[in-house]
């Protein structure tokens, strides 16, 4: 891959002035060979396999960062959904021991997060799925690096309402077990529809069974770069603005492609995808909400917000597709509340509500992300919120997810601080009318008619 002198100069500016970084280099890893009837035996094999590869990952990424001068923020691992290994456990064996093994090996190797404490239950449960899901609150409360996800629906098979009903309770229990951290265990748990199995971003990263033994996926993020582009096009029409954003996304993706290919070559591991998602942080100038407001909205959440977000994401995807033949994962824009300073301001000023966020998720990369709600919200209401968001994904053939935090003891208007990358966010009001009778019907909502494509 040849990089021109002009591209190098532009990259230097993006790094120094516009907060550009490679958000994560994520090593996908197959753990199916670690399955054993005894949890302690499986855990030992998991530790050995992760440590064999993770130490090399950290060194290679550190070397690339030093040589190219491109900030690489996170070194992460995504593993085969652990529910598949849990199916092999003998009766009475503890699934949580596998989660603790993931955490111990990740921390020992200097890995920021490890994803894949996951289950795919869109059409129903196996025994391993049930055991893993039941252990999620315990594992997220006892570990630092482990992230968990559960896929409860797909456009192909429909929506597993039994799983959604269970996940409302799992979210609630996770929050209660981590109440000393304001329920932050829920920040490591996402409920999906149409989960992508090559996503390098947490908390939803996993290593799908159709992938190689090992693969490198890159997560690139550049809200500050896109914001600068939008501000420079202040007087231009939306068509011209879309072209400018597309060109910027092209430049960002080229850097991600370079880092991915270098890491792949040095590790002797297949290169997977570049996920070009505008992933904000609490840092000033690193906000998707700021981009939308720079387009001409008084506040994120004002009428026109969904249209502006749709245009932004389309331009980002088109630019990324031009820059790399291997764009994947989620690729678009995240709209987390607590992790985006502009979103927090919009909520505090009354411009952005939970209902408007839900409307925006019809076009965004994921869904309701890092939304803080009152701690006394019932498990059934949480399930109803999940169900609404999952339905958007199923009907629109897109990935949607819910990462929601019912903060114990907190009420509407309180500000909850999670620290570091997770930021802080205001507690948002939730519709208090009940949905229990609907949620507790259970069963499976059939797939939409347009799923019949064969």
Image: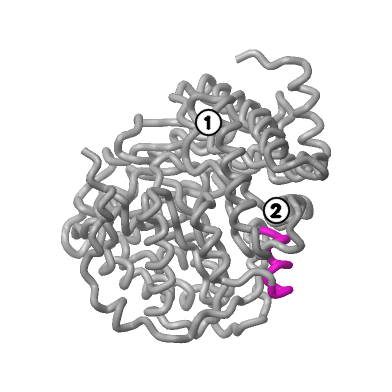
Quarter of the picture containing the C terminus is: top left
Q: In the visual, does 402 lie left or right of 283? A: left
How crowded is the residue under tag 2: few (<14 C-alpha within 10 Å), some, or many (20+)?
A: many
Q: Which residue is painted at 68% across and 76% down in the image?
A: 415
Q: Is residue 74 above or below residue 378?
A: above
In this view, the residue in front, 180 or 222, is: 222
Q: Which residue is painted at 68% across and 16% down in the image?
A: 3
Q: How many marks?
A: 2
Q: Is residue 186 above or below residue 54?
A: below
Q: Name the residue beneath numbered marker 1.
A: 56
Q: Which residue is painted at 57% across and 35% down in the image?
A: 58
In this view, the residue in front, 25 or 268, is: 25
Q: Is residue 307 magenta?
A: no
In this view, the residue in front, 8 or 363, is: 363
What's the CA distance linking mark 2 and mark 1? 40 Å
Which is more N-terminal, label 1 or label 2? 1
Label annotation for residue 292: 2
Residue stretch in magenta? 340-350
Q: Considering the numbered disc 1 on the image, is that residue within a helix, a strand or a loop?
A: helix
Label annotation for residue 243: none
Q: Position of residue 208 (x, y in %)?
A: 34, 40
Q: Is residue 341 magenta?
A: yes
Q: Position of residue 395 (x, y in %)?
A: 36, 55
> Dots 2 and 1: beta carbons under 8 Å?
no
């Amino acid at each position: 891959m040849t990089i021109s002198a002009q591209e190098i100069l532009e990259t230097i500016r993006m790094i120094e002035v516009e907060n550009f970084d490679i958000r994560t280099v994520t090593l996908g890893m197959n753990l199916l060979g670690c399955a054993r009837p005894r949890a302690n035996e499986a855990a030992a094999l998991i530790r050995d396999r992760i440590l064999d590869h993770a130490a090399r990952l950290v060194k290679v990424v550190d070397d690339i960062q030093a040589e190219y001068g491109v900030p690489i923020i996170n070194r992460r691992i995504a593993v085969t959904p652990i529910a598949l290994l849990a199916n092999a456990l003998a009766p009475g064996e503890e699934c949580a021991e596998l989660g603790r093994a993931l955490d111990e090996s990740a921390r020992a190797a200097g890995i920021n997060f490890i994803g894949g404490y996951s289950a795919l239950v869109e059409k129903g449960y196996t025994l391993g799925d049930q055991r893993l899901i039941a252990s999620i609150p315990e594992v997220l409360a006892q570990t630092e690096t482990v992230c968990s996800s559960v896929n409860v629906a797909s456009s192909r098979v429909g929506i597993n309402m039994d799983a959604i009903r269970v996940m409302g309770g799992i979210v609630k229990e996770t929050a209660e077990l981590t109440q000393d951290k304001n329920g932050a265990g829920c920040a490591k748990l996402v409920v999906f529809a149409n989960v992508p199995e090559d996503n390098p971003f947490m908390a939803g990263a996993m290593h799908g069974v159709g992938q190689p033994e090992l693969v490198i996926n890159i997560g690139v993020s550049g809200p500050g770069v896109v914001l600068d582009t939008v501000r420079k096009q202040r007087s231009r029409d939306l068509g011209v603005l879309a072209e400018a954003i597309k060109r910027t996304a092209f430049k960002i993706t080229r850097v991600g492609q370079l880092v991915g290919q270098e890491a792949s070559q040095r590790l002797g591991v297949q290169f997977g995808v570049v996920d070009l998602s505008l992933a904000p942080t609490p840092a000033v100038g690193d906000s998707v909400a700021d981009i939308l407001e720079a387009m001409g909205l008084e506040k994120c959440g004002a009428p026109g917000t969904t249209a502006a977000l749709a245009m932004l994401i389309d331009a980002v995807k088109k630019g990324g597709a031009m820059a790399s033949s291997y764009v994947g994962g989620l690729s678009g824009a995240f709209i987390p509340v607590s992790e985006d300073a502009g979103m927090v301001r919009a909520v505090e000023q009354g411009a952005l509500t939970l209902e408007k966020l839900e409307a925006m998720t019809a076009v965004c990369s994921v869904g309701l992300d890092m939304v803080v709600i009152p701690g006394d919200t019932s498990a059934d209401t949480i399930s109803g919120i999940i169900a609404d968001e999952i339905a958007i994904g199923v009907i629109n053939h897109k990935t949607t997810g819910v990462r929601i935090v019912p903060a114990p003891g907190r009420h509407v208007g309180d500000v909850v601080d999670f620290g570091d990358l997770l930021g802080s966010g205001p507690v948002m009001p939730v519709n208090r009318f009940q949905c229990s009778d609907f949620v507790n019907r259970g069963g499976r909502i059939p797939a939409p008619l347009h799923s019949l494509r064969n």
